[in-house]
Amino acid sequence: MPTDLFTQAAKEQTDREAPLAARMRPRTLDDFIGQEEIVGPGKLLRRAIESDRLFSSILLWGPPGTGKTTLARIIANRTSSHFETLNAVMAGIADIRRVVADAKERRKLYRQRSILLVDEIHRFNKSQQDALLPHVEDGTLILIGATTENPYFEVNSALLSRSRLFQLKTLTEANVMTLLRRALTDKERGYGTRIVRADEDALRHLASVAGGDARNALNAIELAVESTPADQNRVIHVTLAVAQESIQRRAVLYDKEGDAHYDTVSAFIKSVRGSDPDAALYWLAKMLYAGEDPRFVIRRLLILAGEDIGLADPMGLVVATSAAAAFDYMGMPEGMYPIVEATLYLATAPKSNTAGSYFRARAQIEL
């Protein structure tokens, strides 16, 4: 039919014009980079995918750009089951009902299983997750949920208990370097048909600053290649300077309401409490670089001064209080100095938690 020809042509054009990160998405497990702990040779999930025997729902949890959606797409390419996708940001109860009705019809008429990928499943509210639950439980749907947030907090416990959880880790620099080189040499989806010479230090810079996010790195190399004019020999030369312009900031994983926030704050507190000023400065820099409110940091320092320094050095509370007052007068960026001084003072001060005796006394009174 002509319509089919037009549709196919439009799809091919869309694929050609897609961003490099989308074009280079791995299609098989052999092309998949990283995550050997869960999809390496002989691992449970790999065996289930290769044998098309994914009988239970799974949750894929990990930072952006680590392969969650890619892994789901690989499952879609290998399975004989019907595969459907919903994005939790845009989908609602009506979409879930439609998917369930279609799945029941296929199961009844053709004995075909249905696999549903819900991208960013943490965006589904409780009622939306509850709408999925009975159909996951009775096998109408095999759910693949992809999330960047801790599913123990963001996914209903009933749905979580009926799913197998797989945690994906941030890609290593070596993983990202492999992806970058593949993009430059792939003749079908990458830049293999063009003459691109990327310096080793340029690639290392992109791999380092990408922060383990494959999408971030591929977007950067795409910008570098597309924005660099070819010389008289048709060579596109990606130098370190070009790479630095293409990806100017390290991608810092830091969600103010997510795990990364609490993990970073916890590391900061433990560094000060453990008298490690170098580590304390590192975590302080990460928080403020990622956009944390400096007043939040000051509040934590005030608590530390009372809870962990205590009477071992009463000046700790004075220094922290002075830093808070100085910051209110100075603002940013100069207000960094009193925050840094308070951090270093508290990290190097002697420690005492005797003030915590109050809570033990109170507990005795409450008995």
Image (spheres, helix red, strand yellow):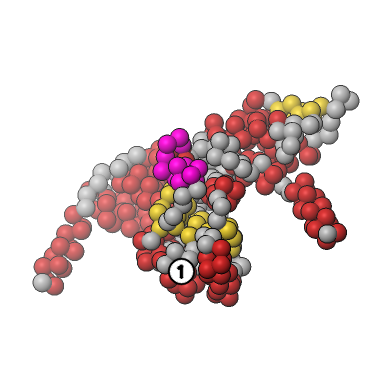
In the rendered structure, which amino acid carries the disc numbered 1? His
* Circle 1 residue: 135
Q: Is residue 66 left or right of residue 266?
A: right
Residue placed furthest toward the right: 232
Residue closest to the eye, 22 or 271: 22
Q: Position of residue 199 (x, y in %)?
A: 69, 25
Residue at horizontal 66%, vertical 44%?
Answer: 21
Quadrant where the N terminus is found in the figure = bottom right
- Disc 1 crowd rating (10 Å Cα; few below 14, some 14-19, many 20+) is some
Answer with the quarter of the image where residue 291 lies.
bottom right
Residue at horizontal 43%, vertical 49%?
Answer: 166
Check the image and report above or below for 164 versus 364.
Answer: above
Check the image and report above or below for 254 versus 97.
Answer: above
Q: Is residue 123 left or right of residue 354?
A: right
Q: Position of residue 227 (x, y in %)?
A: 79, 39
Q: Position of residue 215 (x, y in %)?
A: 62, 45
Can residue 329 be seen by looking at this rendering?
A: no
Residue at horizontal 65%, vertical 25%?
Answer: 200
- Is 325 inside the magenta-drawn segment? no
Residue at horizontal 65%, vertical 32%?
Answer: 182
Can residue 270 be seen by looking at this rendering?
A: yes
Q: Is residue 5 left or right of residue 359?
A: right
Per the rendered image, the range of residues in magenta is: 40-51
Residue closest to the eye, 3 or 155: 3
Residue closest to the eye, 39 or 329: 39
Q: Please tell me whether mark 1 sits on a helix, a strand or a loop.
A: helix
